[in-house]
Structure formats: C-alpha cells, structure tokens
Image (cartoon, coloured by chain):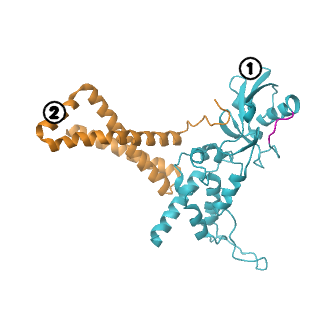
Amino acid sequence: MTSETLNVTIDRGAAGLQDYAVPAYDNQTVLDVVSWVQQNADPTLSYRFACRVGMCGSCAMMVNGVPRWTCRTHISKVLDGNAVTIGPLRNLPVIKDLAVDMDPFFDKWVAAEGVHHGAMTRDDPIASLGDDHPEQSGADFGRECINCSICYAACDTVAGNPNYLGPAALQRAWNLLNDAKDEGRMAILEAVSGTGGCHNCHSMGSCTTYCPNELDPMSAIAGLKRETAKSFFKRGR
Amino acid sequence: MSAHGITSRAHPLWLAYILHRLSGLALALFLPLHFLLLGQALRGEAALDQSLAFSDMFLVKIAEFGLVFLLAVHMFGGLRLMAMEFLPWSPSQKTLAAGATATSFLIAVLFFMKAI
C-alpha cells in the first residue's frame, strides 16, 4: 500500500461522482471500503450485500470499470495508485447509488425458460439417473451460477440491445436443455431462438472472462446456437 | 471516465471481435470503389487502362497491402467464429486445429511465392 489513505470515488447517480478519503488497512475488500464510507462518512449511501463470502451474488459493482464481486476483491488488487472508482453494476437500472434493480435480469431468466419443466408429480418415486446418462454432464455445465449478474454487466450485446436475454439466462437454458430430468426441450429452444435469443451473441467473451466462478456462458450460448440451428433444419421451420 | 461504464475490454476474444467488425466495415467501404473501377471496363479498354494506371502509384500499392490484410483478417475471423460456435471441441483441440491451419497456410504461401 503506497498511502495510508485511499482516494475513493463513488458514482452516486444524480448527485454525481463523490470523493471520500478512506483509511487503508492490511486486509480490506472493496466491500469493506464501501461499508466504511456508509458507516463513517455518509450514512445515506445505498448499496447491497449479504453473505460477504462470495455465495449470495448480491454485492456486484463496477470497480475501476470492471464488474466484480466486491466482497471477494481485495482492494490492493484494483487500486490505481491509491485511487479506486466504484459504480453501480452496468446494464441495469439504478435504484439509488450502488444498488441496482435486478428485475430485468431475473425476468429474462424466466423468459429464457430457465425454469424446471417436470413431467412427474410429488407422488411419483424419485427417478434415479444412474451412470447411463452421459449427457447429464452437460447439465452440470454452469450449475455453480449464483445469479450475480457480473456477466450481464460485462456484456456489450446487452448494452446495445435491451431485449437480449443475456449470458446468465441463456446458460441456464443450456443447462436445462442437457438435463435428463427436464422435459422442456421445445419450449426452451423456442424461447432462446427468438428476437432476444442466443443468435444475438457476438462471442465477445466478456461473460466468460469476468465470471468470478470461472463459468463459461459463451460456450453455453454456442451450444444453444448449434441446437437451435439443428432443430431449424430438421423441422424445416 | 464514468464509474458506470466498462473500461477493460482488452481480452483476446473481444479484440478478435472488434478486428472482425472493423475489417468488415472497411471492406464494405472499399467495395463500391472496387466495382466502380471494374465498371470502367464497360467503357472500353482505354478507360480501364487509364484507371488501372492509378494502381501503379506507390501509395496505392501500400493501400493494396492493407486491403489484402483486411481480407485475410476478415476471412480467418469468420472461420474462427464458425469453428468456435459450431464445433464443440475442447480448447486444446481448437488450439491444435488453429496451429495446423496456420502452419499449412504458411507452407502454401511459401510454395506460392516460390512459384511466382
């Protein structure tokens, strides 16, 4: 650490960029910095967090122009000299200060048919998959997604086309398409091949580059492109 | 710099994307000129030769080098995209395939240059 005080700039929307001098500590995450500002400098600062250990996916913000989990980002990793600029997550409406409205993100999750399509009821016995379902490994793809919206904020296609479903929702659709227990194949293919669907993706790869869980939504979307193309040629639609 | 915007796009896939886009745009701008020049042939041999004399200028030769570069970049960019999206290979398989293509292209170009 080059200085004992950090120059922290926070984008507070209509109130503009505001600077704060925050004391530096040896072990300090970006979330600690934001919390210090709220607890000691300006109690009206709004932001969102819950678990502080990279499990819940609620504290994502733009840190020096890069979407990050603030709870799992040590401040020394992102400091530019002793300065850091923190803003609300990109591509989502800002509620206030650093808190964004996640509704469009979750609505697209549903619009991409990212919901379980079951064929059985609670009275049926639990189906056992055993080892004879090699395609099930495809369903494990992206299982670790915690809906933090980092990929959605990183995506330039989302920025240019508000109707685009985005990397997280499409990765969830790919997950279910490969799941032997999911019966929604046609509904999923229909949902992801529409106007806002997988064919909007330009394979820029920012989703895969910035995913804190090291998932690969870009390859999932490429998988959807292949499956929708196959289904198109098979049915002559 | 707005704290809201994204600033770090400098990763290989995004650079490949922007190179593909810009080369495509530049080629689209070049095409009308290309057709205009070819269209001179309709007005007879003399008119075409007069226009083609323009291409002997040194600056135009340099520009032609740029044009061939744009074409190559755009063609391989397109092949890269199709391979990436439609061939579900593992990353190491893709690296091997790209290496093999580049090597065979290099050998073919060397052979071609020797032939002419």
Residue A36 in picture, x, y percent from top left:
84, 31
**Above-or-below relation of A6 to B103:** above
Q: Can residue A118 be seen in this view?
A: yes
Say left or right for B24 vs A81.
Answer: left
Query: Which chain gets the cyan colouring?
Result: A
Q: What element carries label 1?
A: loop
Total labels: the figure holds: 2
Q: Mark 1 points at which residue?
A: A2
What's the magenta bit mostly, secondary-structure-wise? loop
Of the 4 image quadrants, the one containing the C terminus of chain B is top left
Q: Mark 2 points at which residue?
A: B50
**Chain letter, orange in picture:** B
- Circles 1 and 2 on the same chain: no
Q: Which residue is drawn at 44% across and 42% down?
A: B20
Q: What element carries label 2?
A: helix
Q: Is residue A46 magenta?
A: yes
Camera-near label (1 vs 2) is 2
Judge left or right: residue B44 versus residue A187.
Answer: left
Residue A19: name its quadrant: top right
Q: In this view, does A59 lie above or below A229?
A: above
Question: Residue A39, how many percent across, how many down?
Answer: 88, 33
